[in-house]
Each structure stands twice: as structure tokens, then as C-alpha cells.
Image (spheres, rainbow, N blue to C red):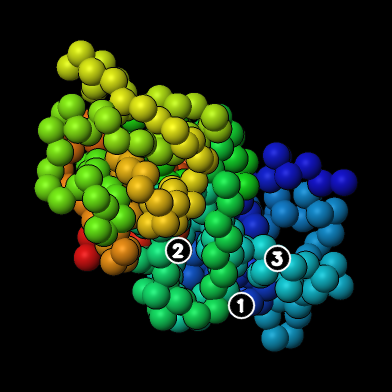
Amino acid sequence: MINLRQIDLNLLLTLDVLLSEHNVTRAAQRLHLSQPSVSVHLAKLRDIFSDPLLLPGPRGMQPTARAEELREPLRLALQALEQALGPAGSFDPAGASNTWRIAAADYGESAILLPALPRLRAAAPGARLAVVPAVLSRLARQAEQGEIDLALQTSADAPPSLRRRALFTERYVLVARKGHPKLKRRPTLEQFCALEHAIVSPGGGSFTGVTDEALAAAGAARRVVLSVPHFLFLRSALASTDLVAMLPSRLLRDAPELQQLEAPVAVQGYEMAMLWHERVHRDPAHKWLRDTIAAAVAE
């Protein structure tokens, strides 16, 4: 068998042109080489393939049977190599059939993917989108191994090995059902702490969060009576009870049954970002996906 490591790529380029021209002089002109150089290349090729490849004939050099066998595979291989080494092509979303996998929690689904979905579907109707659970401890490995294309996560928790693009800064507001008897106006700190609170605990079961940290710094505490793992479930619970919660403001854009007020304690917000692996950073299709999501969220 021929050892590819011992073959100069330039020799294969020369063979491809010789099989097209059947003439050393014309091949030299196309390759911008001297005729003696092409002759040297041909001698090396004959040695590599143990075949004369091209023989003198009445109408130029005639390929041997072995050369004819090489013609099409060699042409296809060189074309594939040119495509691999050439610049990245453009991406046409209208004709795309990509399947994108995005890791997101229910907040990312509602605040980011839902606004972006109409634009994605309109521009790339043949593409598919799979939303998978976002597990922080697995994001870096999933992105590296190609199990996910994109992740939606807070910048503070973003794995350092992934690229990041900030989308927006979120803030917390006090949320309750409209007509809540104890929230006709912004509550005082004492009134706020006396309310029955609900909390989202993504990991499950916790009754404390960033609001409780802010209250503790102010020497206060609240009563949390409900802990749930999902924001959207909590929205429904607030609409049907007198519970209140501190929620990200973007979750209230399409919730006419709820009201939001400024809380009497400052709770630090967070930055939401898209995360992806370096291996897809320059891919035109992936860049289009990132730009489209970012544009939709910005509106």
C-alpha cells in the first residue's frame, strides 16, 4: 500500500493536470512550473504508483489503465480538499435543514426562545429546534462533544471554557395577582416581609434565594411558604392565590392577570447569555442562529 505521509501533495496536483492535458508542456503552463519540473514530478509519480501512468502516443501522452482508474477518485479527492481548506461558505437559512439543540431552563425558554421562535421559523422553515434541559454541570461537556449547539445561562454561572455573548440584564420585581388585597401600593419593608412568599428553586426544595440574602443584609427576613422548580408554574400559582414572589421582569410581559411592583429591598439582578463551544464559533449556520436569537431578544 502507498504511504500517504510520503506523498507530496504537489505531485497529485501535477498528476491531475497531466491526466487532463495529456501533454507535459501544457501541464507545465497550467501549473506555472517549468517543463523539466513537471517531468521530474511524473518520474516520481511513476515510482510511487509502480506504473508509467502516461505513455507517448501519436496524439500526445496516453494514460495507462492504472491512470484511468486514478482519474476520477483523484479529481474528487482534490475537490474535497479544496473545499475543506477554502473559506467558510455562506449560510442560506431558507434552504437549511439543520437540527439545532439548545439547552435552556424554563426561564430561557420563555424569555429568549419564545420571542425568537417566530423569526427562526419564518427564516428557516426547513430547520428543526430541540430544546433540552440545561444542567449546569454538564453544559461544557455537552457543547464540546456536540450534544448541544447553544446554551442559555446566566453569565455568572457560565463555564469558562465556552464562548459567551451577553443578551440582556434582568431585574427582579415583586409580583402578585391583580387585585391582591395587601398590594394596592408599593409595600414597606415590614409589609413585604409579612406577605406569604413563593420561590423558584431550580435544584428543588430550597426556601431561600437572592431576595433572602438582600433581606438578611438589611436585618430582615420573610416567610416563604412555597418552593417550586419552574417559573411558569409559579406564575399560575400567583394568579390563583394571594401568594407573592420576586420574579424576573421579562416573565411578566404576557401575564395580564398579574401585577408587578418595585420591592422595598434591592435585589441584585443577573445577565443572561448564550454559550457555545469554540468548534462552532466560525460556522456560518451557527453564527446566523446566534445573531437571529440576539436580534429577536433585543426587540
The amino acid pointed to by label 3 is: Leu
Q: How much space separates mark 3 and mark 2, taking CA atoms?
A: 30 Å
Q: Circle 3 sits on which residue?
A: 74
The amino acid pointed to by label 1 is: Glu
Q: Is residue 90 left or right of residue 16?
A: left
The amino acid pointed to by label 2 is: Ala
Instruction: For label 1, count other residues whose C-alpha is less than 10 Å away and answer few (under 14), some (14-19) or many (20+).
Output: some
Are the two marked residues, 3 and 1, in contact with CB atoms closer than 8 angstroms?
no
Give the image location of residue 95, x and y in percent.
Answer: 50, 81
Give the image location of residue 276, x and y in percent.
Answer: 45, 44
Q: How much space separates mark 3 and mark 1, taking CA atoms?
A: 15 Å
Give the image location of residue 151, x and y in percent.
Answer: 47, 46
Q: Is residue 252 visible?
A: no
Q: Element at badge 3?
A: helix
Q: Residue at x 63, y 77 (%)?
A: 20
Mark on residue 285? 2
